[in-house]
Amino acid sequence: MTDELNVNFRKNFRIALIMTGGTIAKTYDPQAARMCNADITIDTYIRAQRLPGTEIRYIDLMRKDSLEISASDRDLIIERVLAESRDNDAVIITHGTDTLAHTGEALYQCLPAPLIPVVLTGSMIPLVVQHTDGIQNITEAILACKLLPAGIYTVFHGTVLPFPGVMKDREQMTFVRTELA
């Protein structure tokens, strides 16, 4: 088992981080007096982590609340995951929590046998707010990419869930498995 795990810890493990917006990326707009998806801050938090041997490429694909993500936006996400899968060892997608499971299911339907781990993550509290869960989730997603076999997953609050069959549990404020028929 140790040899299998070490396979992904080689020098320069390449991760494409596709940013789509969502709560994890929300910042405060003082003119509008509200949180919005206007600025990019996630790279600042990741660069503050110690990640030797990990190369992260940031892709600012869209800046949307996940309730605004359309079918054509999901197609764009899928296209980008396919493109980034060619040159990277893993892909992380930061996504809003309200429709993250829909995007994960769409990825699973279009890429039933991905060649690398594809991990969706986000947060319930924006990165710029005290006590955010975003730093934990993105850090765990980076580590999960190095440990997981190829597949489509969500990583949230110390849990890895493979697609299909993932949903947001609004009561627990995290993601859980659904009962698959």
Image: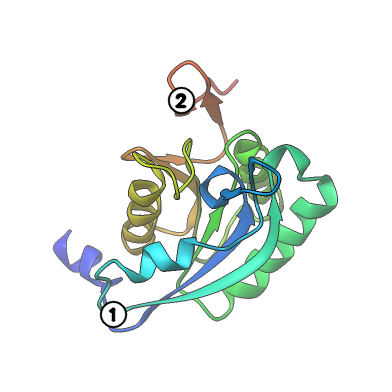
Q: Which mark is residue 173?
A: 2
Q: Residue furthest right?
A: 72
**Closer to us: 34 or 93:** 34
**Closer to us: 131 or 97:** 131
Q: Residue furthest bottom?
A: 11
- Color theme of the render: rainbow
- Between disc 2 and disc 1, whose residue precedes? 1
Q: Is residue 158 left or right of residue 97?
A: left
Q: Is residue 98 above or below residue 138?
A: above
Q: Tell me the residue at 26%/73% (across/down).
A: 9
Q: Residue furthest left?
A: 2
Q: Is residue 109 above or below residue 173?
A: below
Q: Is residue 108 left or right of residue 110?
A: left
Q: Is residue 117 above or below residue 95?
A: below
Q: Which residue is mark 1?
A: 53
What secondary structure is found at the residue carrying circle 2? loop
Neighbour tally class for label 2: few under 14, some 14-19, many 20 plus, Cα within 10 Å: few
Q: Tell me the residue at 82%/46% (across/down).
A: 71
Q: Tell me the residue at 71%/44% (across/down).
A: 32
Where residue 87 appears, as percent x and y from the top left, is 55, 81
Where residue 131 appears, as percent x and y from the top left, is 34, 39
Type of residue at label 2?
Met
Type of residue at label 1?
Gly
User: Which quadrant of the view contains residue 180?
Assistant: top right
Q: Is residue 52 left or right of residue 109?
A: left
**Closer to us: 136 or 4:** 136
